[in-house]
Image: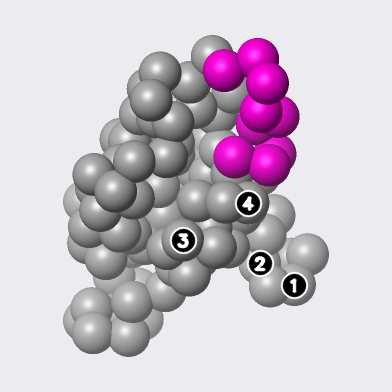
Amino acid sequence: MKGRERAELRAEAHHLNPTVHVGQHGLTPSVIGSLDDALRTRELVKVKLGNKDDVKPEDLANSLALATNSAVVQVIGRTATLFRENPDLDKRRGEVPPWRK
């Protein structure tokens, strides 16, 4: 992902609320499944990372990205933004992106 694309996605993600929360149990199969579903339908997803002190938020975000075949857009504090394009979604020029719907 190029810097310009990442900057545009960061701007789009600013107004999003976290839709997936990683709790005290860390990366469980259900969390990865929920994130995979959210990425499939919305493409751009914010994830609230748990308060595990032994794992850095950047490492946790990278693990989530590897598990879901997505890209980390940004990590701010304990909130990560991930993006994965879904070629099956109908996208037309001038139409609202799926994460705004």
Asked if marks 1 and 3 touch (Cβ < 8 Å), the reply is no
Give the numbered dot on residue 12.
none
- Find disc 4 in the rendering and name its residue: 62
Asked if marks 2 and 1 touch (Cβ < 8 Å), the reply is yes
Q: CA distance from mark 1 to mark 3?
A: 21 Å
Q: CA distance from mark 4 to mark 1?
A: 17 Å
> Mark 4 against mark 2, which lies toward the viewer?
4
In the displayed structure, 23 sits above or below 88; it is above
> Mark 2 against mark 3, which lies toward the viewer?
3
Q: CA distance from mark 2 to mark 3?
A: 22 Å
Q: Tag 4's secondary structure?
A: helix
* Image color mode: one colour
- Find disc 2 in the rendering and name its residue: 5
Residue, x 25% and y 53% (percent of image)? 33
The amino acid type, in three-letter code, at marker 1 is Lys
The amino acid type, in three-letter code, at marker 4 is Asn
For residue 62, side relative to residue 49 (left or right): right
> Mark 4 against mark 1, which lies toward the viewer?
4
Disc 2: CA contacts within 10 A as few (<14), some (14-19) or many (>=20): few
In the displayed structure, 40 sits above or below 29; it is below
